[in-house]
Image: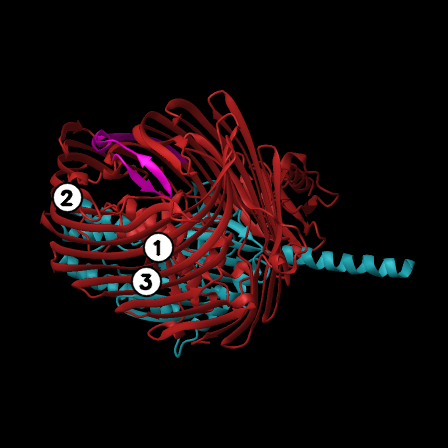
């Protein structure tokens, strides 16, 4: 009889342990909002629109244009998914482009899909290829104290990350920093985290991860270097046209 | 050498403090489950609060770093999901080697991290995608089942979907209009297997209305899987069972880029409804309200009553929504056919609980109805939109009510039979054109026409045993409405948009007896000339909306020889504040309504009773005021929602029936009275959330309601104050486990007091439904036990019964067994009464005991066109 009771207790104990083990498998979920507005875009507008009232109106329309993203990070599995949820479009406003999604696998390879000037492509790279330069500049965003970092590979990328949230992820391909990226700016847009929470819903994460990993399967992957160069060329072309 | 040694010695002394400023710290970070924390962050914080450096722990949670002792105030260790650990450098003691060694133990946060708002968005994202994966859904679950599992949505029996305190009336499919005021069809027709995703769109705008972007509606969008686009999808279902019970359903739907269309049909005698009356009224009666005759006739079609002996229903709906760049066509047609029979026992009491009459009733209703509504919108230019609406409805009804009455005062008994045949036809036309005169001004003009012809070729009460008496009022009612209206809307800024409208409405009504007798004709003409001024503003500080509209009306009422001119000033005001999680609104309005023309009939027969009115009643105008405040909290992230609503209504000069007596044939005789004042207070709290989200998720729903109504009634020509107070608490619990077994329990307890004059009567209703749900791969089963215990006038009425269903799903085929109230087949319990209730109306209290219930047990087979 005692043996049976012990067996039963052992069964419940293992069952309970399994449940708790599952509970510990946490997913960090971060909501981001991206607006197609940046100092560079504003400078471009300013050079094209002389009327200050019209400039203010266009600028306001741009700030109303929003892309909503969610980042899911599997803290233990080191995988992450960053995906576009919805877009709030403004009539008569078109944007240069936007990120569609980005996935990072457990071996730190990332695949990012982007739309830029009517073309869609997927580029890939390794987390280790991203050369971040952390500066001493600091700011408090929401309740988090953040440090500023710039990406040597793409100098227009400026991010603010929170060491309090030790997750090497952020919007798009901002992987590899010792903290979650709360705010990111590029030549074309600005992305800010609006809320952060975490959950144990690993099933949902796995479904999303599979979905976007499948979508990321492309015939040809560009490299980050190629994408950055193309964008820089585009900016140079615009700059030169504006100067004329 | 001595000098050299002295210099080295001196330098050594001088250097020592320098080395003493630099500290070396190393150690390991261990989590509470004894695992090591790899990639934890160690932040070095300076005395001024700024960050000096960030290090990460390596394999096995090990770390090592150097720091300036004089500058660093603390180390903070962070790991996601664990309580941060802060170590003050003042408290650290180096070991013999001068190093600081730490073993950091991090404890798991006892509660999951609540949502942290980093940068508050002014409002919820325009489109919120719902996470369906965590709901553990079956492929056969319909949209109603899916929404019921999400705490942030509330679905009601009448098809209402409430989200963030707002009612959702439109359901898009693939972001294109599909179900408009047809939630009940959508909730049953859209199934998980065809759904790719569900989202709430908070800023939906109609493509074919000119406006200044001010009206943003909250709608639900269902995206279908690719296999379900551009093809006809649907299912057919056939069921047959004990006692010749049948259920036949057919659904076919087509969702494509240019057109969304569906045809649904259901013929059954098991009490199922696929269409709800409230939705129909929103489609057909919103611009030109239906008359009392139409509403009463439709009530017979849609009155939910699970206590019928016979309940045949056949409902069909065809909807086509086709949209191009320049035009849009919405067409929806309904056909209904009913044949039902129920039996009940009524006892009427005076306010101080003296029985007046007892009735055993057998009521049979038959009817059919055809209704069609079409709206055509055309964009004539970028700045001009034309709308045309045509609604036609035809309702035919036949009711026969047999009653055996016992008058308590003298124990006299009578058998009476009331018969009523109804034939109603109505047609409504509306033509409107809107022009954007400039970026700031919109001019809209519309013309409306309505015609109604209602006939009661038979409307009488007679003795059912022998033709000893026959009292009747066979009549015809005609109504013609013409209205013209123009309005000018200006957009001075998003915060201030004034509107100005001018209109004239002429209503002609007459009631004639059948066959026609000129002396019995009652006519009324009302001319309503009005102008209204309104202002509205949106997104003030990105959070506040308001609107105010006041109308000045000159109202001429010519009823027979009576002429009455009135100047009326209806108004409405609304103020709303909304941010990402909260929604607060305040509204108040006053409106006036002219009484029904039939109140001017000196003699009438309504629902098997004699009703005496007077011509002056037809010129009565009642006033209604309503003040409403609502608060809604909605956190989709955490699955929590709270809604609190308080409303206070008062009305003046409403016309109501009062019992004047019972004649020798047992017929109730009512007179119409003008009730000087009536007030109603309603409070409602509705809260829902997921409990134990990660270990054993349970959806909990608690509803608290309170109603207090003060009015006066007339009994035997004397006014009697009546106060009705009722409170209800409802608790629902539903487990949402991934496993094979789930449970659901819904309990409801109501308590009330009805005070008539100085006498008070109490009532208590309790009901509980406990369901067990088993789901193993292709097999689904649900068994529910229902228990009711209602106490009225100190007497208990108890009901116990079972509902249940079993389904087995093959690829495209589902086989099942559906059963309701099936104890009435096996008779385990002695159920003599169902849903017993006490009401106070017309100056008397009435106890209604239903002594039968619809019961069935049918075998069904369902075939889906698409896998």
Whether the magenta-drawn stretch holds residue B629 is answered as: yes
Chain letter of disc 1 in the image: B
The residue that disc 1 covers is B398
What SS does tag 2 mark? Answer: helix
Q: CA distance from mark 3 to mark 2?
A: 60 Å
- Chain letter, colour red: B
B96 lies above or below B181: above
Measuring from the top left, give residue B500's x and y in whole percent.
13, 37
View extreme (left): residue: B437
Whether the magenta-drawn stretch holds residue A125 is answered as: no
Measuring from the top left, give residue B834's x and y in whole percent.
56, 47
The residue that disc 2 covers is A52
**For the point 14% across and 49% down, which residue is it?**
B448
The residue that disc 3 covers is B335
- Chain letter, colour cyan: A
- Proximity of marks 3 and 2: CB atoms separated by less than 8 Å: no
User: Does the rendering let one see residue B202?
Assistant: no
Chain letter of disc 3 in the image: B
Which of pointers 3 and 2 indicates the residue nearer the eye?
A: 3
Q: CA distance from mark 1 to mark 2?
A: 72 Å
Measuring from the top left, give residue B234's x and y in whole percent.
40, 72
Please give the range of residues in magenta.
B602-630
């Amino acid at each position: 009889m005692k043996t049976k009771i012990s067996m039963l207790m052992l069964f419940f104990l293992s069952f309970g342990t399994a449940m708790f083990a599952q509970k510990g498998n946490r997913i960090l979920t971060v909501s981001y909002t991206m607006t197609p507005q940046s100092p560079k875009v504003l400078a471009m507008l300013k050079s094209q629109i002389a009327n200050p009232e019209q400039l203010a109106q266009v600028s306001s329309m741009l700030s109303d244009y929003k892309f909503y993203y969610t980042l899911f990070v599997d803290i233990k599995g080191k995988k992450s998914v960053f995906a576009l949820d919805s877009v709030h479009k403004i009539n008569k406003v078109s944007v240069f482009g936007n990120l569609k999604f980005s996935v990072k696998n457990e071996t730190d390879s990332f695949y990012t899909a982007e739309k830029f000037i009517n073309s869609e492509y997927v580029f890939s790279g390794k987390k280790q290829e991203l050369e971040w330069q952390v500066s001493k500049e600091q700011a408090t965003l929401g309740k988090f104290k953040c440090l500023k970092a710039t990406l040597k590979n793409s100098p227009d990328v400026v991010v603010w990350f929170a060491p309090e949230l030790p997750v090497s992820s952020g919007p798009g391909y901002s992987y590899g920093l010792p903290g979650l990226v709360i705010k990111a700016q590029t030549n074309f847009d600005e992305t800010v985290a609006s809320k952060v929470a975490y959950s144990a819903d690993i099933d949902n994460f796995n479904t999303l991860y599979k979905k976007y990993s499948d979508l990321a399967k492309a015939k040809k992957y560009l490299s980050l270097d190629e994408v950055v160069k193309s964008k820089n060329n585009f900016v140079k072309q615009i700059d030169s046209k504006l100067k004329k | 050498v001595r000098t050299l040694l002295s210099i080295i010695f001196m330098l050594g002394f001088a250097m020592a403090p320098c080395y003493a400023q630099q500290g070396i710290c190393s150690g390991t970070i261990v989590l509470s489950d004894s695992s090591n924390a790899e990639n934890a962050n160690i932040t070095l914080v300076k005395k001024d609060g700024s960050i000096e450096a960030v290090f990460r722990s390596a394999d096995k949670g090990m770390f090592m770093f150097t720091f300036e002792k004089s500058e660093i105030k603390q180390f903070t260790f962070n790991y996601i999901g664990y309580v941060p650990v802060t170590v003050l450098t003042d408290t650290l003691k180096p070991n013999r080697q001068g190093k600081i060694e730490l073993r950091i133990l991090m404890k798991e946060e006892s509660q999951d991290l609540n949502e942290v708002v980093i940068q508050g968005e002014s409002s919820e994202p325009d489109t919120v995608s719902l996470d369906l994966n965590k709901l553990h859904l079956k492929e056969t679950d319909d949209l109603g089942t899916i929404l019921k599992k999400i705490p942030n949505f509330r679905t009601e029996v009448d098809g209402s979907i409430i989200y963030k305190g707002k009612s959702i009336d439109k359901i898009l499919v693939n972001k294109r209009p599909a179900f408009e005021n047809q939630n009940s069809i959508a909730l049953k027709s859209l199934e998980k297997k065809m759904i790719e995703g569900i989202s709430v769109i908070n800023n939906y705008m109609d493509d074919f209305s000119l406006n200044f972007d001010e009206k943003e509606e909250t709608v639900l969008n269902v995206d279908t899987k690719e296999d379900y686009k551009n093809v006809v999808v649907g299912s057919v279902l056939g069921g047959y069972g004990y006692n010749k019970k049948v259920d036949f359903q057919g659904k076919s739907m087509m969702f494509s880029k240019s057109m969304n269309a569906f045809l649904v049909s259901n013929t059954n005698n098991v009490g199922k409804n696929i269409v709800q009356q409230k939705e129909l009224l929103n489609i057909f009666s919103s611009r030109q309200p239906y008359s009392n005759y139409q509403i009463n006739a439709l009530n017979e079609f849609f009155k939910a009553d699970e206590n019928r002996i016979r309940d045949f229903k056949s409902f069909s709906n065809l909807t086509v929504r086709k949209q191009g760049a320049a035009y849009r066509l919405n067409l929806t047609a309904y056909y209904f056919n009913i044949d039902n029979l129920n039996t009940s026992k009524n006892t009427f009491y005076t306010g101080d609980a003296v029985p007046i009459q007892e009735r055993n009733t057998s009521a049979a209703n038959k009817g059919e109805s055809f209704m069609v509504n079409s709206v055509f919108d055309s964009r004539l230019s970028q700045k001009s939109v034309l709308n045309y609406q045509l609604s036609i409805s035809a309702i035919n009804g036949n009711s026969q009510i047999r009653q055996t009455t016992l008058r308590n005062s003298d124990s006299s008994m009578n058998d009476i039979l009331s018969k009523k045949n109804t034939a109603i036809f109505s047609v409504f036309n509306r033509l409107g054109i809107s022009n954007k005169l400039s970026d700031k001004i919109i001019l809209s003009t519309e013309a409306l026409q309505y015609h109604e012809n209602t006939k009661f070729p038979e409307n009488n009460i007679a003795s059912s045993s022998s033709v000893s008496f026959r009292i009747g009022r066979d009549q015809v009612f005609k109504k013609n409405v013409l209205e013209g209206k123009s309005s000018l809307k200006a957009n001075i800024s998003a915060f201030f948009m004034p509107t100005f409208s001018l209109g004239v409405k002429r209503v002609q009504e007459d009631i004639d007896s059948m066959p026609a007798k000129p002396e019995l004709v009652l006519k009324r003409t009302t001319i309503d000339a009005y102008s209204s001024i309104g202002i509205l503003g949106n997104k003030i500080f990105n959070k506040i909306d308001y609107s105010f509209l006041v109308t000045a009306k000159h109202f001429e009422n010519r009823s027979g020889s009576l002429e009455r001119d009135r100047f009326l000033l209806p108004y409405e005001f609304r103020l709303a504040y909304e941010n990402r999680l909260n929604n607060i609104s305040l509204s108040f309005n006053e409106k006036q309504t002219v009484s029904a023309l039939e109140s001017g009939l000196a003699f009438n027969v309504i629902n098997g009773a004699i009703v005496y009115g007077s011509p002056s009643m037809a010129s009565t105008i009642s006033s209604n005021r309503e003040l409403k405040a609502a608060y809604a909290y909605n956190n989709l992230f955490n699955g929590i929602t709270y809604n609190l609503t308080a409303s206070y209504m008062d009305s003046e000069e409403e016309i109501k029936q009062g019992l004047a007596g019972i004649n020798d044939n047992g017929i109730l005789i009512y007179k119409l009275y003008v009730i000087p004042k009536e007030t109603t207070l309603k409070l409602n709290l509705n809260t829902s959330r997921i409990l134990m989200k990660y270990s054993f998720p349970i959806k909990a729903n608690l509803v608290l309601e309170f109603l207090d109504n003060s009015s006066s009634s007339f009994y035997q020509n004397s006014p009697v104050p009546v106060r009705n107070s009722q409170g209800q608490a409802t608790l629902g619990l539903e487990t949402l486990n991934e496993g094979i077994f789930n449970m659901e329990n819904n309990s409801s307890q109501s308590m009330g007091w009805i005070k008539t004059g100085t006498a008070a009567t109490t009532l208590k209703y309790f009901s509980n439904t406990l369901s067990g749900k088993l789901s193993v791969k292709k097999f689904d089963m649900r068994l529910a036990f229902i228990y009711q215990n209602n106490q009225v006038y100190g007497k208990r009425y108890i009901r116990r019964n079972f509902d249940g269903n079993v389904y087995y799903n093959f690829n495209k085929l589902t086989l099942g067994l559906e059963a309701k109230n099936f104890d009435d087949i096996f008779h385990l319990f002695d159920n003599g009464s169902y849903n017993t209730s006490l009401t106070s109306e017309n100056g008397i209290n009435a106890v209604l005991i239903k002594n039968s219930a619809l019961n069935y047990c049918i075998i069904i087979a369902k075939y889906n066109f698409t896998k």
